[in-house]
Image (cartoon, coloured by chain):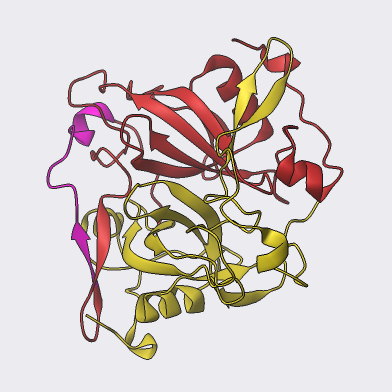
Chain colours: A red, B yellow
Amino acid sequence: MKIKEEDIKFTQRSSVQEIEEGTSFSPKFNADGLLPCITIEHDTNQILMFSYLTEEALKKSISLKLAHYYSRSRNNIWLKGEVSGMKHFIEDIFIDDDQDSIIYVVRLNEPSKGGKKASCHVGYKSCFYRKIKVKEKSIELEFTEKEKSFNPDIIYDGIANPTKI
Amino acid sequence: MKIKEEDIKFTQRSSVQEIEEGTSFSPKFNADGLLPCITIEHDTNQILMFSYLTEEALKKSISLKLAHYYSRSRNNIWLKGEVSGMKHFIEDIFIDDDQDSIIYVVRLNEPSKGGKKASCHVGYKSCFYRKIKVKEKSIELEFTEKEKSFNPDIIYDGIANPTKI
């Protein structure tokens, strides 16, 4: 079923009972108007990225079934894959008990200029490509993805890296 | 390997290259001193909850291998399972490309007063027990967990519900 963006209405939050145990869709955006969003891959349950949504980004995503996210550094809504071709095709959207965080369940596709199915701008499939390794007196990161899925210098040629120090 | 809380040091963020492609652990806490954390179950990859960590909560979690989270409503660090017995035993911790969000990979146990292995205070295994169902002119929530894993009235007897309207 498809719904137009303008037909999507959120139910006003009226009781803890309805928020937790009901069927009304009442997402709670934070003081900055943002809703945390976790994106996972449909076939594997692998977590691909973590981001934030605005109300408009959420409504566009629901209506078009293509993930739109909010960039805090650029202060705009972006269609995932607009530059790279690596879109997030939404299969399902889950919401948590108190309705203040969201999961997008998506399918991936290949970057438009070549490479394997992936999501992360660094070149890996998932943004979570490292885990911590605890040593006796220190902590290091260890790579869990051994090679990149695509070459980010080709896919994002001329585009500024979104990562900030 | 075990590490003491006081021996855990974070590396100062010095370059995008090192943050994204290096092995230095440099988590970035937001302006409120918080780091978003996604908790997943080790055996299934299922997302259990979304929360925030402070630096102290993260260090305690790493050192004790038991998940500690930060409660924004109560303004304190809490050991998950302290009341209910439903602890999160940490197997792995992943961090994302720009090191501003974290995944705890955990094993669950049963509530101390009876029930199946679970995580969510409402009684379900995961906090994400509903997904959206798109209709032509509206959106409803649909339950994906059909029954509760435990009775929250027994497990949290006398404890205020953390959900806020």
Q: Residue furthest left?
A: A146
Residue A67 showing in the rendered view: no
**Front residue (pair B115, B120):** B115
Can you give x and y, in whole percent of width and height, for residue B30 in the image?
54, 62
Q: How many marks?
A: 0
Which quadrant of the figure has residue B111? Answer: bottom right
**Front residue (pair B18, A120):** A120
Can you give x and y, in whole percent of width and height, for residue A31 in the image?
73, 51
Location of the N terminus of chain A (image quadrant): top right
Location of the C terminus of chain A (image quadrant): bottom left
Which quadrant of the figure has residue B136? Answer: top right
Measured along the vertical axis of the image, is residue B116 above or below residue B83?
Answer: above
Measured along the vertical axis of the image, is residue A98 above or below residue B52?
Answer: above
Is residue A162 shown left or right of residue B141? left
Residue B108 showing in the rendered view: yes
**Front residue (pair A124, A121):** A124
**Front residue (pair B48, A50):** B48
Which quadrant of the figure has residue B131? Answer: top right
Q: Residue furthest front?
A: B114
Residue displayed at 29% across by 84% down:
B3
Is residue B12 shown left or right of residue B71? left
Can you give x and y, in whole percent of width and height, for residue A159 in the image?
34, 33
Measured along the vertical axis of the image, is residue A39 above or below residue B68?
Answer: above
Q: Is residue A149 magenta?
A: yes
Residue displayed at 34% across by 57% down:
B95
Can you give x and y, in whole percent of width and height, for residue B51 in the image?
55, 59
Magenta highlight range: A140-156
Q: Is residue A121 magenta?
A: no
